[in-house]
């Protein structure tokens, strides 16, 4: 197993590779955070970094989003800094999909200190396309369906807080 060091104040879910991605991404860059069933390897090959996805084994979606959003600001200069996958027309979001998305949004709001977070809904096939245009792909072990989100990185102000318009 690889050597693992512990950092103070950093969630242990955030691997060195993921911390590098979060630090390297700039304002407006998108991080795709996807579930275990998402075609992460093939989509990640098309992203800005064109690298393997960062895989967080054993982490569910809410924990992954909470860990990321505690350190990466969301873009408050756009109407919908978060996007999520929804079924193709004519199909309904399964109960487990509603559950995971609700928990994920609550985790994002908790970690970022935001309320009533606006999320864009993107149909499955369009989501794959948008994810391929992201900066990088992070795949967690979430097995509930439709546990796929796009996070647009915001700005850290001079005071160390999320910059607001």
Image (tube, grey):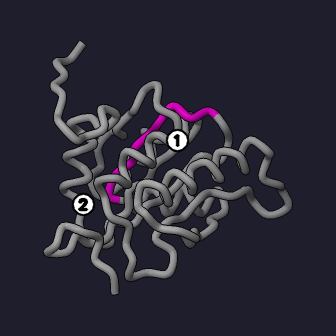
Residue at 43% in and 61% down: 151
Quadrant the C terminus occupies = bottom left
Q: Nearer the viewer, residue 34 or 4?
A: 4
Secondary structure under badge 2?
loop
From the viewer's side, name the closer residue of 52 and 31.
31
Q: Position of residue 85 (x, y in %)?
A: 62, 57
Counting from the top left corner in percent of width and height, residue 20 is at 19, 46
Judge whether 31 appears above or below 163 on screen.
above
At 39% from the left edge and 77% from the top edge, which residue is drawn? 76
User: Magenta stretch: residue 69 in it?
Assistant: no
Earlier sequence position, callout 2 versus callout 1: 2
Q: Answer few, some or many: residues within 10 Å of disc 2's Cα (few below 14, many 20 plus, some between 14 and 19).
A: some
Image coordinates of residue 164 in percent, x first then y, are 33, 81
Residue to which mark 1 is pinned: 61
Residue at the extreme bottom: 165
Count of number-bearing discs:
2
32 left or right, relative to 88: left
Residue at the location (20% across, 17% down)? 2
Q: Relative to 148, does residue 129 appear above or below in the rendering?
A: below
Q: Which segment is the magenta one?
A: 135-143
- Say which quadrant the N terminus sits in: top left
Element assignment for label 1 = helix
Q: Which residue is mark 2?
A: 25
| Residue, far top | 1
Q: Does residue 18 sit above or below 154 in this rendering? A: above
Who is closer to the viewer here, 61 or 106?
A: 106
**Does residue 82 appear to the left or right of 101 in the view shown?**
left
Q: Which mark is residue 5?
A: none
Q: Nearer the viewer, mark 2 or mark 1?
A: 1
In this rendered view, identify the residue nearer to me: 78 or 92: 78
Task: Residue at 19% x, 54% y: name it.
Answer: 23
Q: CA distance from mark 2 to mark 1?
A: 20 Å
């Amino acid at each position: 197993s690889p050597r693992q060091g512990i950092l103070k104040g950093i969630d242990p879910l955030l691997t060195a590779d993921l911390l590098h991605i979060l630090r390297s991404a700039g304002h407006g860059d998108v991080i795709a955070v996807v579930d275990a069933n998402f075609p992460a390897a093939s989509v990640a090959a098309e992203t800005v970094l064109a690298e393997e996805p960062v895989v967080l084994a054993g982490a569910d979606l809410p924990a992954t989003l909470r860990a990321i959003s505690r350190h990466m600001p969301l873009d408050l200069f756009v109407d919908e800094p978060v996007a999520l996958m929804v079924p193709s027309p004519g199909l309904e979001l399964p109960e487990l999909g509603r559950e995971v998305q609700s928990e994920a949004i609550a985790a994002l709001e908790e970690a970022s200190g935001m309320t009533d977070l606006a999320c864009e809904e993107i149909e499955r096939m369009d989501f794959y396309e948008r994810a391929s245009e992201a900066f990088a792909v992070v795949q967690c072990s979430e097995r509930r369906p439709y546990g796929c989100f796009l996070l647009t990185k915001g700005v850290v102000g001079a005071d160390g807080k999320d910059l607001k318009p």
